[in-house]
Image: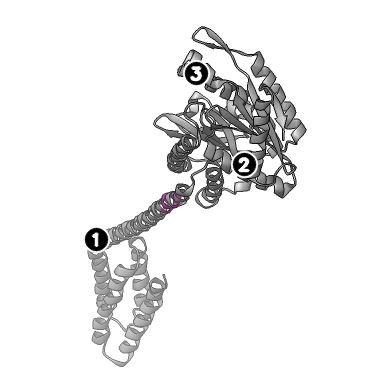
Amino acid sequence: MKNKLILYPAFAVSAAVIYVLGLFFKNSVADYAVFLLGILILLAVKMIPRGEFKFFLVFAWLATATLAFPLKTISPAALLICCLWYLSLYVFSIPFGDAELKLNDREQELMNKKKNLEEIKRESVSTAEKEDDNIESEIKGITSLYTAAKDLSFAIKFDDMAVIIKEILKKVLKYNFKIEPDSVNVLLAFKKRDSFYIAASMGYDDEFIKEKEQELIKSVINDKTQLEISYSSSGNDNMDFHKSVLKVPFVVEKRLLGIMIISAPVENLFNAKQVENMKILANQIAISLEKVNLYEEIQQISVTDSLTGLFVHRYFQEKLEDEIKRAGRYDNHLSLVMCDIDFFKKINDTYGHLAGDFILKQLAVMLKNHTTPAETVARYGGEEFVIIMPDTDKEAAHAKAVKIRKDLEKTKLNFNGTLISITVSMGVSTYPGDAVSRRNLVEQADKALYASKNNGRNRVTKA
């Protein structure tokens, strides 16, 4: 813009110089010099748009006429030739001006394309960098899931599994999903043997879990959760699971081993990528749960009598030792009941050993039905059984043993159409009144048992 404006005073100065030359030299010098003004006009072709170029030519002619013609420093012929020269330059400048405009337009078009390409390049690079970051983040997320799941390999019990899963879930929610663990509720249910139970929870009151455990389990365990992870934003089975619910089943070979419910009061909290990552974690947990189940089965087999399903003698001794230590630590009572089937050899001789096995199985079932989950029933050996009664004094244990004896006396056992009646003799000893060691407590109960046998059988004797 500035260069274009300079042309006007530049031409005027040039015309004034020609005028001065005409004063000191002959007219012919000025006549020839006026043609030099064409240089400025050529510059004008380059620097001034075509629409304005004709006005510049008029300005150039007026400047020449104003300075030269009135003072007769330039001949009229030279001035006329000058005007013709200006006009010729204008005519010949038209195609060059058009070409210049086309070149300028083409140059501008190329510049615009270059800018567009650079912008596309910048966007492509930015997109590629973002994709790389996302892929790297996904890889880190998946790696962290597998790394976190390695901790599960150290668990061999359901309680250990529950603790480890809670810790892993907290890390996954916070670092992988960017969700604060305190902002969600979690229910973790495991299948142990043939039934489900709530192994752990987050965000729920313990008393509520105890009171509503079976109701919660019935609500979350259904056919829809056996083979897939489902997502809901409108609650679940009339339970208070807020607005976002992620149901994570632990499945191995179409067998449901457990389920985890993650819920929150925020809508659409979980996206598709998070669900996919949770599937990876669920697979790892399911495999670990299968391992724990197998371990529990092996443990159960190793401590369970194959005939009666009760605990074996070795387990009984270990359990009694632990219960005596616990009773001593909390200053509680502990009672031990030993029982023996009266005339069991006669039953075997009369009805056969299959009948004897049947009697042992039925007695085991009846003893289990008469005891609580906190109490331990074991087969001591042969036709002898023992019951460990924690937090039970001698009188309470004696009363319970009497009730068991009376119920057995009234029962008729049907073996292949033959009704068989049995009675038992029982002995009761109590920690710490009768003994303070495992061995002595068993010895005292055994002595009381033989006292029952020596005094006519079918009775309960206290040590």
Residue in front for this viewpoint, 66 or 170: 170
Nearer mark to the viewer, of 2 and 1:
2
Type of amino acid at the residue the image marks with label 1: Ala
Mark 2 residue type:
Leu
**Marks 2 and 1, Cα distance to the nearest angstrom?**
109 Å
Q: Residue at x 44, y 29 (%)?
A: 255
Residue range of the region highlighted in magenta in the rendering = 140-145
Work out whether residue 236 can be spotted.
no
Q: Residue furthest right?
A: 395
Name which residue lies at 33% across and 82% down: 72
> Which residue is labeled 1 in the image?
99
Quarter of the picture holding the N terminus:
bottom left
Question: In this image, 297 relative to 386: left or right?
Answer: left
The Cα–Cα distance between marks 2 and 3, rounded to whole angstroms, is 31 Å
* Residue 93 in magenta stretch: no
Work out whether residue 250 or residue 409 is closer to the camera in this orientation and state it: 409
Residue 442: % across, % down? 63, 39
Marks 2 and 1, the one that precedes in the sequence: 1
Figure quadrant of residue 92: bottom left
Type of the residue with mark 3: Asn
Q: Which mark is residue 310?
A: none
Pick whichever, 275 or 456, lies toward us: 456
Label 2, secondary structure: give it: helix
Q: Dot 1 lies on which element?
A: helix
**Residue 31: horizontal and vertical position, in percent?**
25, 82
Query: How many neighbours does mark 2 have within 10 angstroms: few (below 14), some (14-19), or many (20 or more)?
Result: many
Q: Give the residue pinned by disc 3.
A: 348
- Identify residue for label 2: 320
Question: In percent of the image, x 64 and y 40: which residue is there?
Answer: 443
Which of the two discs, 2 and 3, labels the residue nearer the N terminus? 2
* Dot 3 alpha-carbon crowd within 10 angstroms: few under 14, some 14 to 19, many 20 or more: some
Earlier sequence position, callout 3 versus callout 1:
1
